[in-house]
Image (cartoon, rainbow, N blue to C red):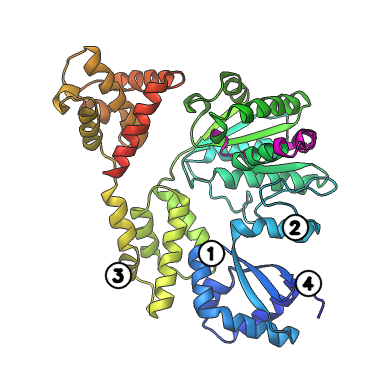
Amino acid sequence: MNAHPKEIWEQSLNIINGEITEVSFNTWIKSITPVSIENDTFILSVPNDLTKGILTSKYKNLIANALKLITSKKYNIKFLIASESEEALTLDNTNKRHNKNSVLVNDEMSTMLNPKYTFDSFVIGNSNRFAHAASLAVAESPSKAYNPLFIYGGVGLGKTHLMHAIGHYILNNNSKSKVVYVSSEKFTNELINSIKDDKNVEFRNKYRNIDVLLIDDIQFIAGKERTQEEFFHTFNALYEANKQIILSSDRPPKEIPTLEDRLRSRFEWGLIADIQPPDFETRMAILKKKADVENLNIPNEVMVYIATKIKSNIRELEGALIRIVAFSSLTNKEISIDLAVEALKDIISSKQSKQVTIDLIQDVVANYYNLKVDDLKSARRTRNVAFPRQIAMYLCRKLTDMSLPKIGEEFGGRDHTTVIHAYEKISTNLKQDESLQNAIGDLTKRLNQN
């Protein structure tokens, strides 16, 4: 049978659906995407490690048997996690094979965009509304709205989702656009390989003869002298040719240590948009959308429990939901509050034990600078006390959800403007003070270890 993998898989689903419960089918089987057939191996993409483990242990033989009934051939089944299979999906579409660390190109240029990351699937809330609006504006009018667009925020908050959504939107409206999405790590590896293989011209042509460049986690080029040099010229070439540049980072340009000033200034030429951790309403909306997309029947009180306990990022929210569904499937118990508490007990207890508080920051900073906590709260203004106090205030602003007035109150009843001054001073000094960068890094590590 010479059918496309997608056609074979769709026929196999009818067989598999009749062999297992509706919950199991919707939870595990519907999340699978067919990738390709290579010799005797049927390659399937799955969203995460948990799904891969469940499918391998419980459903691998069922899938193989269903495929055999359709094709009269016994296939080996190989599961790839989505991030691993994106390359295979692109290769299957272009019939071209490249090294995994390279940018994939066909005659016109290819992309590495996740089909699930679109504007339609993005949940908008107060924490990301501005970044979403800016991304949509850029997608609608590349090079005319904001160039570059710089999106920053913590891990798992939706930066990558928005970048992929921009790429999809542009390609859907102009399929001839040359759009390239790449991580800064892959950009660096490509550069290293081009130098080693004496292919600098090819490397530059790949990145400079395009319409849209999306680079994820741009902060990782900081400190890499040759990479920064190459990207500086790539940025200039694209910008001067009126091509769109979109960058993402875990922090704003001014807070990226060891980033060259000439790059920092260019990153600030356009629009900088931040994404904050989602508030309760947004967390609930994210969970409901995930349940709806995956066709999961989750009681509202269970979603409230998850949204109350998991506050840091979207990835952990969705992971908690899948963990509960998996726990229900494996124990043959209905999803309930009691089951959710049991399924998430390790995650929640671990997160609670690692929670960073103002008290903890004061203790760690005081110990680091051989002071007492009372010194940080005192009226003393000598540098050996005032500077650590400013660092502690900076960390409180960065690592806790406490308001500025509350932080000031915990430092001897100081005004919120004092906290703002401390935060801005430390942020400014971080740009050029390597010893301060090291101190903040050490303190953050100690806080996370407590």
| Secondary structure category for the residue under label 4 | loop
Residue at the extreme top of the image, as rendered:
382
How far apart are the alpha carbons under marks 3 and 2?
45 Å
In the displayed structure, would residue 380 be above or below residue 312? above
Whether the magenta-drawn stretch holds residue 204 is answered as: yes
Q: Earlier in the sequence, mark 1 or mark 3?
A: 1
- State the residue at coordinates (71%, 51%): 99
Q: How far apart are marks 3 and 4 (CA)?
A: 44 Å
Q: Residue 140, can we see it?
A: no
Which one is closest to the eye, mark 1 or mark 4? 4
* C-alpha distance separating marks 2 and 1: 31 Å
Q: Mark 4 points at which residue?
A: 4
- Residue 114 picture location, percent across and down: 65, 53
Counting every numbered tag in the picture gives: 4
Q: Which amino acid does the dot numbered 3 rest on?
A: Asp
Residue range highlighted in magenta: 195-219
Tell me whether the residue at label 1 lies in contact with that at label 4, contact meaning CB atoms closer than 8 angstroms. Answer: no
Q: Nearer the viewer, residue 54 or 442?
A: 442
Q: Judge whether residue 395 can be spotted in this image.
A: yes
Percent coordinates x, y for residue 21 in the rendering: 51, 82
Residue kind at label 4, given as amino acid type: His
The amino acid type found where label 1 is placed reads Asp
Task: State the quadrant of the C terminus.
Answer: top left
Q: Mark 1 points at which residue?
A: 292
